[in-house]
Amino acid sequence: MTKEDILRKYSDSTNNSILTTELKENTTRVQLRGVIGSGASFIAAAVHQNIYKTNLFVLADKEEAAYFLNDLENLLGEENVLFFPASYRMPYEYEEIDNSNILLRAEVLNKINTGKKHICIVTYPEALTEKVVTRSHLSKNTLELKQGEKISIEFIIEVLIEYGFDRVDYVLEPGQFSIRGGIVDIFSFSNEFPYRAEFLGNEVDSIRSFDPTSQLSIQKLTYCTIIPNVQTKLLQESRQTFFEFIPENSVIWFKHFQLTIDRIEKAFALSETSFSKLDSVIEQLEPKELYIDKDTFTKQVLGFPLVEFGNHFSLTPTQTITYNFSPQPSFNKNFSFLLDNLNANNRN
């Protein structure tokens, strides 16, 4: 039996049919009881295939989120699942910014802002603490190139410099661009790989993504979107919470709702402590401008359809669905026992 067969059985099950129907409403709060291990991933993947909404999964910490992300990528494909990590290791320590995480956050914001709603986003409390640029400012700071359109390379250079991009000989990391004759290479903060646009005069002849190390093409494209470092822009532009950015009918899944609230509170307190210790001639924004507090978090989250799963429940549900999963036996290197268990599961 393949994972596709198992996923299909989840989709066809009575419990998942009830869950799917519930999540089509915008005021529901569902508790999933008796769910063990990767069962939550199969349930989530099956639901995602049956409702056209953004699903946001909030796990207890970054490690747990990474495991859940891996499950969903295997079940749904990497193009349908995004990771939304935290930017900083510590608040207000901008030298501690993780560029790979900035890229992942920007990719999520860009996908949502360009109208892609049928996606899964996996995250954890510390990542949700940070506010993001508003949709209007992200749109204002987005350059879109389309195959066949007329646009001058000089104009692109002006825009990229305004966005804070660095002109280099060869692009290697996000925030860089290079010009060689009619070829423009741009490493946007919204994509894992840089883009290469070839021009015939002032017309975009072709666009493709490429590997900056080997210089080999990866995928031909009809258009691409270029956005700057959204975290740098965050210090200059208006900000909003992530829950104000995602579609209003998004479904939010919590592994542990109360733990998430506690970690949001702890992260905000840490930002206040870090702010109070700042000794800089550069004026810094106050924590309330850059981070969300637990009261705002709770108020905004409760406006979405919610799903609680795991072993800890905090919200009063409108629907409780019990799956009665059985825990995996402890095999203790007894391969005969393992084989018997697999065969029994296959028969069942």
Image: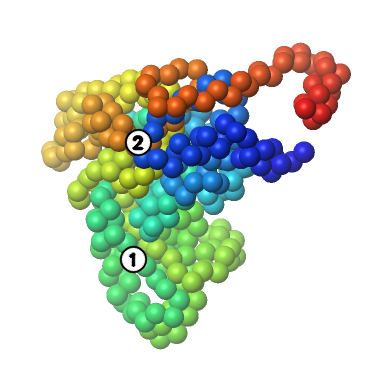
Position in image of residue 230 (x %, y %): 31, 50
Give the quarter of the figure containing the C terminus: top right
- Relative depth, front residue between 334 and 120: 120
Earlier in the chain: of badge 2 and badge 1, it is: 2
Residue located 22% across and 23% down the image: 273
- Relative depth, front residue between 83 and 227: 83
What residue did someone put label 2 on?
Answer: 27
Q: Between marks 2 and 1, how big is the CA–CA gap?
A: 37 Å
Kindly indicate whether the residue at mark 1 contacts the one at mark 2 (C-beta within 8 angstroms).
Answer: no
Residue located 37% across and 50% down the image: 109
- Can residue 69 be seen by looking at this rendering? no
- Relative depth, front residue between 34 and 280: 34
Position in image of residue 211 (x %, y %): 55, 60
- Relative depth, front residue between 223 and 46: 46
Residue located 47% across and 24% down the image: 320
Residue located 27% across and 48% down the image: 133
Q: Left or right: where does residue 205 sit relative to residue 241?
A: right
Examine the rendered structure and indicate whether residue 314 appears above or below residue 347. above
What residue did someone put label 1 on?
Answer: 143
Q: Secondary structure at mark 2?
A: loop
On residue 307, which mark appears? none
Local packing at callout 1 (Cα closer than 10 Å; few below 14, some 14-19, many 20+) is some
- Give the residue type at disc 2: Thr
- Give the residue type at disc 1: Leu
Local packing at callout 2 (Cα closer than 10 Å; few below 14, some 14-19, many 20+) is some
Q: Secondary structure at mark 1?
A: strand
Examine the rendered structure and indicate whether residue 176 appears above or below residue 4. below
Examine the rendered structure and indicate whether residue 77 appears above or below residue 225. above
Q: Classify residue 26 by image quadrant.
A: top left
Numbered disc total: 2
